[in-house]
Amino acid sequence: MTRIAIIGGHGKVALLLSELLTGEGHSVTSFIRNPDHAGDVTATGATPAVLDVENSTTAAIADALAGHDAVVWSAGAGGGNPDRTYAVDRDAAIRSMDAAAQAGVNRYVMVSYFGAGKDHGVPESNSFFAYAEAKAAADEYLRGTNLAWTILGPGALTDNPGTGRIDVDPSPDGGRDTSRANVAILAAAVLDLPQTAGRTIEFRDGTLPVAAALDN
């Protein structure tokens, strides 16, 4: 059994992931900001723990992560407020990476998005700009750490059922819909595949089973 920490544990992807991981026999701690969300987390089989990463120090996050074998970052400010977006999606994410290193949690999976990076192409006038900038900075920082990191870059998220079939590095002109359930399926898969460390995996709903898509 592996002990896995999920930061942003009440998000839709995180709840689906918690249920998958606990179903596989893993022990999951889901960190949430709002204690009122504890019941939803418990229903997945995970253990809820209150941690406001936006306002937590690196040391506090490290204390929370101690004893885990892997961490999944699935948190986000949810857009709307650029200052909060930078505070959560960039600054808190980076603190969590430093915290994981301090706590000796080497495996780190980041849920990002398809097209993230310095050349994201989002104009500053677009409301998505702060998120694009924040994720680019966080992903770049993660790549520079000594953690065994994997970055997941799903396309436009939907609530469609998970098929367990994806296309990796798809052409941008072929559509980018990606079900949250497939994001959770892929996250669970890479946690069991140490050979995916050091990879950025951009993907969308597709035709290949996850294992085959990762080998393709």
Image (cartoon, rainbow, N blue to C red):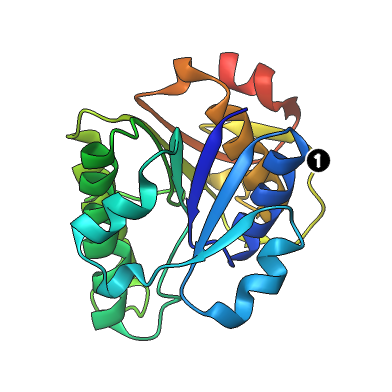
Residue sitting at x 73%, y 25%: 208
Name the residue nearer the viewer: 133 or 188: 188
Name the residue nearer the viewer: 149 or 56: 56
Residue 120 in view in this figure? no
Residue sitting at x 45%, y 62%: 75
Q: Residues within 10 Å of mark 1 (few under 14, many from 20)?
A: some
Q: In what quadrant of the picture does the N terminus appear?
A: top right
Name the residue nearer the viewer: 98 or 117: 98
Q: Along the horizontal axis of the image, is 132 left or right of 77?
A: left
Residue 124 in view in this figure? yes
Residue 67 percent location from the top left of the image: 41, 38
Q: Is residue 197 above or below residue 50?
A: above
Residue kind at label 1, given as amino acid type: Thr
Residue sitting at x 82%, y 52%: 161
Name the residue nearer the viewer: 140 or 75: 75
Q: Along the horizontal axis of the image, is 44 left or right of 150?
A: right
Residue sitting at x 24%, y 81%: 83
Residue 92 percent location from the top left of the image: 27, 63
Residue 119 percent location from the top left of the image: 24, 50
Outermost residue to the bottom: 81
Identify the image quadrant of residue 81.
bottom left
Q: Is residue 3 above or below residue 199?
A: below
Identify the image quadrant of residue 216.
top right
Residue 149 percent location from the top left of the image: 35, 32
Identify residue for label 1. Answer: 163
Mark 1 element type: loop
